[in-house]
Image (cartoon, coloured by chain):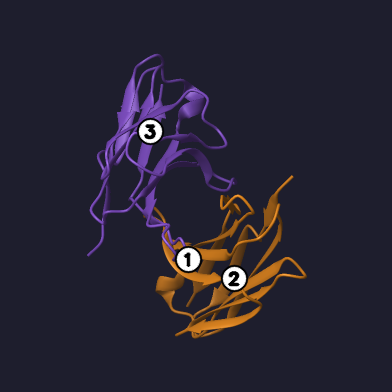
Chain colours: A orange, B purple
């Protein structure tokens, strides 16, 4: 079966760095997405990786290793507004998205 | 600003009632999707549509139907609501034409079936 694994919850301190991991086993691979979802709100797109390596976008970076079935989202200089759930999703060989259950990130002052 | 609008943020219905959830997007996107989101689970695809009057079953279509009569509107219908359909329903759209396929989501409709 197809599976996306990410930690259920993480806690970090304001101003620090946090890495949220995502491992996947899917039927084929056509890209990996990270979305952010604040409580009670719609998910919003953060990043897309289709080739191995690191993609940097301001305070957020996303890394992909296709051979290891692994990605991480790196958040630097954490702010209280970064408290949210972070959803990992992989597009399989049929171009369908397989979603992880999300990682709830709690930022403490 | 691009927008996906869902008609109702919160609904409370009784078992057996017919429920309509409406979704409208103003981005001229070809693709539209209905997901449900439950605690501890990833988003699960109910139905999707690649064009007007087209529909495809997702992973959990049982108990649901959809309608896409106009490009901008995608409706989810629960013919006879049941308590196990209590959930958050998310509509999304995407262009799907040579881009990364980023999804744009609506705010969600939280349905409670009593």
Q: Are marks 2 and 1 on the same chain?
A: no
C-alpha gap between disc 3 and disc 2: 35 Å
Residue at left offset 54%, top offset 44%: B39
- Chain assignment, label 2: A
Mark identifier at residue B100: 1
Classify mark 1: residues with Cα within 10 Å, few (<14), some (14-19) or many (20+).
Answer: some
Residue B111 occupies which quadrant of the picture? top left
Residue A49 placement (x, y as % from top left): 57, 72
Query: Contact, CB < 8 Å: mark 2 with mark 1?
Result: yes
Residue B97 occupies which quadrant of the picture? bottom left
Query: Which is closer to the viewer, label 3 or label 1?
Result: 1
Query: Contact, CB < 8 Å: mark 3 with mark 1?
Result: no
Residue B22 placement (x, y as % from top left): 28, 36
Mark 2: which secondary structure?
Answer: loop
Front residue of this view, candidates A74 and A18: A74
**Residue assigned mark 2:** A50
**Residue assigned mark 3:** B111
- Chain assignment, label 3: B
C-alpha gap between disc 2 and disc 1: 9 Å
Horizontal side, residue B40 vs residue B24: left or right: right
Mark 3: which secondary structure?
Answer: strand
Quarter placement of the N terminus of chain A:
top right
């Amino acid at each position: 079966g197809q599976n996306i694994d990410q930690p259920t919850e993480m806690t970090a301190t304001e101003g620090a760095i946090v890495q949220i991991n995502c491992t996947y086993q899917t039927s084929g691979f056509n890209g990996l997405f990270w979305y952010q979802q604040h409580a009670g709100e719609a998910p919003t797109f953060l990043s897309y990786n289709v080739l191995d390596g690191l993609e940097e976008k301001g305070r957020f970076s996303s890394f992909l290793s296709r051979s290891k079935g692994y990605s991480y989202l790196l958040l630097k200089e954490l702010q209280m507004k970064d408290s949210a759930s972070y959803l990992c999703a992989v597009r399989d060989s049929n171009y369908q998205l397989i979603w992880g259950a999300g990682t709830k990130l709690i930022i403490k002052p | 600003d691009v927008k996906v609008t869902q008609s109702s943020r919160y609904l409370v219905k009784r078992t057996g009632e017919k429920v309509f959830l409406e979704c409208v997007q103003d981005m001229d996107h070809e693709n539209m999707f209905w997901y449900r989101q439950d605690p501890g689970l990833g988003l699960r695809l109910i139905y999707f549509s690649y064009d007007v009057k087209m529909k495809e079953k997702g992973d959990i279509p049982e108990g649901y139907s959809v309608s896409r009569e106009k490009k901008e509107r995608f409706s989810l219908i629960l013919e006879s609501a049941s308590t196990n359909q209590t959930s958050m329903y998310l509509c999304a759209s995407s262009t799907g034409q040579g881009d990364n396929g980023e999804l744009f989501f609506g705010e969600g409709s939280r349905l409670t079936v009593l």
